[in-house]
Amino acid sequence: MTYLQKFISDAMNNGYSYEDAVSDPRAKEAARRDDAAARNAHLHASKAQYLAAFQAARQQQGSNHKGFIDQEEMLLAMQDEAYDKNPEYRAAVEAILAQTPGEVLGVSATATAADGTVVRLGQPYSTERATPESMMENAYREMVMEQLANIDHSTARGRYEYLQFLTDPKNAFLIEHTEGLVTSQDQRTHQAMLDSQAAGQNDRIEIVSEANDGSVPQGSFGQGEGNQ
């Protein structure tokens, strides 16, 4: 029997109505003691108890899945107060992670760009022991990868957006995993240009063209053939 249940029972035995008992300030205090007791029990439970509670919740949902179903559920588990305070809870989370599919953990992905290019993302994720911080970092990297997969490299705007991603300091992980990320010839050309600039080999973009020996008329910039 909880503190609140005992208080209401005692109050009604002493002539209180149910409505008067639950509205009594002592009922609120009893409920507060129940919350504190539940929190204390949660913080000091064993690994087996945590896993049993997890599976009980799964059964109530009508599911037999033993791992986390998505990153949101995984993050909520890691943000629990017990994660920092009780090694038994962390051990339970690790056991659940072992049953969680790789795509939920965010350890690999493959996407198709707008031009049909298959972009293999490799494993540009943090796969050390999971923490709320590492999960947020993985979520950010996954978002960047998703945006990169939607870039059309056949357009100047698309190539510019791609270079913006590569040169953003927050996206340094993309450079580290270039071989897994870049697959098309256009992408490799742009990456080679960036690499040579970073290495100090050149500091400008040169446009190579055939020399004009004078046999072809050359108008002023912005003039079409009709204006020559």
Image: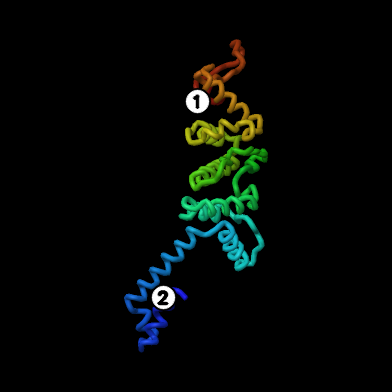
Q: Where is residue 123 in the image (x, y as percent from the top left)?
A: 62, 39
Secondary structure state at the residue bearing disc 2: helix
Residue with the mark numbered 2: 4
Q: Give the CA separation, mark 2 to mark 1.
A: 84 Å
Q: Where is residue 184 in the image (x, y as percent from the top left)?
A: 66, 32
Q: Is residue 148 left or right of residue 43?
A: right
At 60% from the left edge and 55% from the top edge, which residue is drawn?
A: 68
Front position among marks 2 and 1: 2
Instruction: Bin the neighbour count of mark 1 within 10 Å (Cα to Cα): few under 14, some 14-19, many 20 and up.
Output: few
| Pick the front one: 64 or 170 | 64
Q: Is residue 14 left or right of residue 64?
A: left
Q: Residue 62 carries which label?
A: none
Q: Does residue 196 appear in this view?
A: yes
**Total numbered labels placed on residues in the image:** 2
Q: Position of residue 220 (x, y in %)?
A: 50, 20
Residue with the mark numbered 1: 222
Instruction: Bin the neighbour count of mark 2 within 10 Å (Cα to Cα): few under 14, some 14-19, many 20 and up.
Output: many
- In this rendering, the answer to whether 122 lies above or below 87 is above
First in residue order: circle 2 vs circle 1: 2
Q: Please identify the residue farthest to the left as the structure is shown.
A: 25
